[in-house]
């Protein structure tokens, strides 16, 4: 797998940074995470064909994360796309698309398969095809927001028995349900999700934005080989980060360290930061293997067993 940032700015477009969008490529298939305004132009610049997009994963319905979807869908329609497009997003997106002339189901030459995310969910498997399996967990933001975790599909049935037992999983039926991708509840009332107890054998990518530090973000990042985490502010504006449901660079680094992630890419930067090296420096003081996400650069997502462990603080 490889990841290509298309937009790393928070809320406002700045000269050198676009609004949030990330391309994930796996075995020739393309997946889009968020779709801020201007995403389809950035796809062209990155050399990524719209026709190859199999699914779009929207974290939440703030404009800077999904307003580019409308133009992208119209362009796909004009190109007479035939293959279905899966969109994983909050349920309200269906009503929004219905209100746009040209985007209603009867207007499009291809089918949109909307996987609705409901407020209040704790964990949901949202995609399993094309060699990947994607799960979603809630984040803490100003409105309903989800983060995503991508794993190789060949991992999904590999349960770590000792780890599951340590969490209170004892019955054969519970192990079978976990292997089938279903969460279970222990006798003590704890909910255990499949991704908490899987044996890790391949690359894992976690996408965590927009959010304040929270349990959902930590679980998404658990042992991820590559974690993309928002760092809207520096620590000097930590109060503002909490007010707006965002994270600082230090917050992102702490999540990476506490989750045992292998590599951290910072993203979703406030327009007030012209020099992003200050955020990188702040995060590296906590988690050394940190970089600023550079737009249009391809980042290979490699299994940890093939990566050097360079962070002495982890």
Image: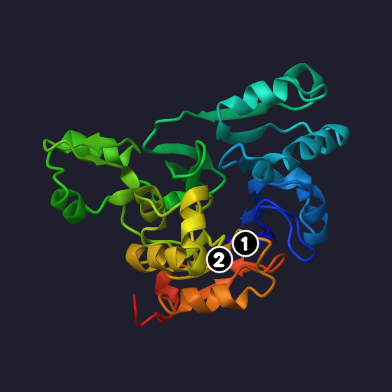
What is the number of the mark on residue 206?
none
Q: Which residue is mark 2?
A: 266
Residue 235 visible in rendering: yes
**Quadrant of the snapshot with the C terminus:** bottom left
- Which x, y percent locates residue 4? 66, 61
Q: Residue furthest top?
A: 106
State if disc 1 and disc 2 touch (CB < 8 Å): yes
Which colour style is shown? Answer: rainbow
Inter-mark Cα distance, 2 to 1: 8 Å
Q: Which residue is mark 1?
A: 269
Q: Residue at x 77, y 61 (%)?
A: 46
Which quarter of the rendered picture does the N terminus lie within?
bottom right
Left or right placement of residue 143 versus residue 217 in this view: right
Q: Residue at x 66, y 67 (%)?
A: 298
Task: Say which residue appears at 17% left-offset and 49% top-offset.
Answer: 167
Residue 144 position within the rendered picture, expressed as x and y whole percent measured from the top left? 50, 36
Q: Residue at x 51, y 63 (%)?
A: 237
| Relative vertical location of residue 249 with respect to residue 122 in this rendering, above or below | below
Q: Decide if residue 200 is on the left or right side of residue 50.
A: left
- Dot 2: what SS? strand
Q: Assess disc 1: are there few (<14), some (14-19) or many (≥20) residues with their C-alpha within 10 Å of its C-alpha.
A: many
Residue 96 appears in which quarter of the rendering?
top right
Say if residue 245 shows up in the picture: no
Question: Relative to the observer, which residue lies in front, 171 or 64?
Answer: 64
Which tag is nearer the camera, tag 2 or tag 1? 1
């Amino acid at each position: 797998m490889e990841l290509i940032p298309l937009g790393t700015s928070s809320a406002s477009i700045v000269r050198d940074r676009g609004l949030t969008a990330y391309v994930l490529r796996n075995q020739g298939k393309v997946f889009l995470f968020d779709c801020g305004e201007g995403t389809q132009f950035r796809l062209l610049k990155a050399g990524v064909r719209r026709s190859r997009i199999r699914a779009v994963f929207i974290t939440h319905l703030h404009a800077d994360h999904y307003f580019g979807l409308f133009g992208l869908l119209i362009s796909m329609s004009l190109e007479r796309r035939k293959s279905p497009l899966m969109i994983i997003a909050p349920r309200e997106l269906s009503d929004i698309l219905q209100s746009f002339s040209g985007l209603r189901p009867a207007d499009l030459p291809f089918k949109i398969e909307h996987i609705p995310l409901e407020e209040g969910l704790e964990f949901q498997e949202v995609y399993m095809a094309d060699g990947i399996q994607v799960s979603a967990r809630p984040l803490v933001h100003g409105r309903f927001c989800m983060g995503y975790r991508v794993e190789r599909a060949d991992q999904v049935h590999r349960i770590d028995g000792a780890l599951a037992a340590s969490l209170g999983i004892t019955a054969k039926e519970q192990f079978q349900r976990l292997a089938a991708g279903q969460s279970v509840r222990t006798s003590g009332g704890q909910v255990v999700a499949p991704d908490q107890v899987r044996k890790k054998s391949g690359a894992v990518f976690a996408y965590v934005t927009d959010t304040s530090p929270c349990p959902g973000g930590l679980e998404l990042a658990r042992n991820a080989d590559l974690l993309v985490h928002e760092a809207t502010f520096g620590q000097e504006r930590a109060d503002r980060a909490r007010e707006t449901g965002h994270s600082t660079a230090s917050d992102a680094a702490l999540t990476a360290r506490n989750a045992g992630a292998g590599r951290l890419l910072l993203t979703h930067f406030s327009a007030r930061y012209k020099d992003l090296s200050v955020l990188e420096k702040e995060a590296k003081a906590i988690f050394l293997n940190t970089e600023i996400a550079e737009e249009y650069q391809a980042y290979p997502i490699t299994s940890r067993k093939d990566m050097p462990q360079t962070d002495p603080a982890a």
